[in-house]
Image (tube, rainbow, N blue to C red):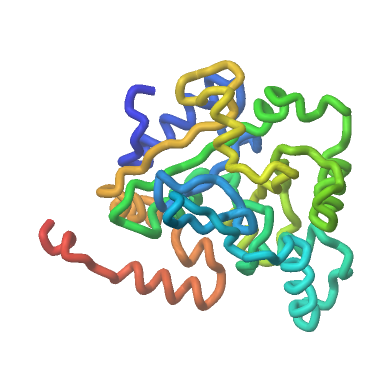
Amino acid sequence: MKDRVIRSIRDYMDIIESIASVYATHIMKSDLIFRGLSSYNHMLIPGVYRAIAGESAQGPTSHPSYGEATEYEILRHFIKNAMSIVDHIDKDDLLTWLTYAQHFGAPTRLLDFSSNPLISLYFSCKREPELDGGICIVHERNYVHSLHLNAKNQTKRDVLNEILDNVIDSSHPCTPYPVVFIPHYIDNRMEAQASRFLVWGNDKTAFESIADRHGSMLEEESRAFFCKIRVDASCKRSLLRELSFLGVNEKKLFPGLDGIGKYISEYYRRTEQDYIE
């Protein structure tokens, strides 16, 4: 993997195919999940755990983004307001409510991924065109094996239930590590985006702090289960054009009139660079 910067879809697929070969998985199987970052420097940490960085006379400071509110308080507030619209979900079905809250913008301990690498590339290119983007790849099977996450022979549902108890009461024991799960698709958008989630355990740190101890899949470390690939900022627009040609665009990823409108806008949009070329 000599060149680890994505400048074309071919670059990207070559890297993924190399990872799949080294780690004995199939590129089309669900072992690999992907997340696109508009900035390579963004960290993998869910919204409810993010902090506001600042400065004071004593040095750098950090404050919770949502003040003194607890995670469960935020979720219950979302449920209370959403139940008049979404009336078919039991108020105590927290995993489904967490999925809804995450999907519609409320802060949760979930982080969106996709099983489709091209969809993640789209999201890495769509914003902040002046910054190098990033693609994060997690190998779930290696992740579970390297951290011995199945040592207790629990089912994934058992582990998720313990995490949900921890949402309600932060003192309740649960795994410290994030868990990968496939949500129930609550609308066409989630299906179109091949949604997957990482749901955090009781360790509120970024995923990189866990993964970096085991090396990078780009370096072919045997116990590695994670890597981050840089997306060249100067190629973001051309990558979006390639992706649109392959059917990965607003119309595909945001089914409905809103997505069609965004697709038409992008189809005809031109920049100064287009006229220079």
The residue closer to the viewer here, 112 or 269, is 112
> Looking at this rendering, what residue extends furthest in the bottom direction?
84
Q: Assign the N terminus to one quadrant of the image.
A: top left
Residue 187 spot, x, y in % from top left: 68, 66
For the point 30% across and 48% down, the residue is 233
The answer, for residue 186, to whether it is visible in the render is no
For the point 73% across and 61% down, the residue is 71
Is 216 placed left or right of 240 in the picture? Answer: right
Residue 117 spot, x, y in % from top left: 51, 43
> Looking at this rendering, what residue extends furthest in the left direction?
276
Quarter where residue 276 is shown: bottom left
> Looking at this rendering, what residue extends furthest in the top direction?
222
Q: Assign the C terminus to one quadrant of the image.
A: bottom left
Q: Residue 143, relative to residue 114: is it above or below?
A: above
Q: Residue 237, relative to residue 205: is it above or below?
A: below
Number of numbered callouts drawn: 0
For the point 36% across and 37% down, the residue is 10
Residue 229 spot, x, y in % from top left: 42, 36
For the point 76% across and 24% down, the residue is 148
The answer, for residue 62, to whether it is visible in the render is yes
Is 153 placed left or right of 37 in the picture? Answer: right
Residue 32 spot, x, y in % from top left: 60, 36
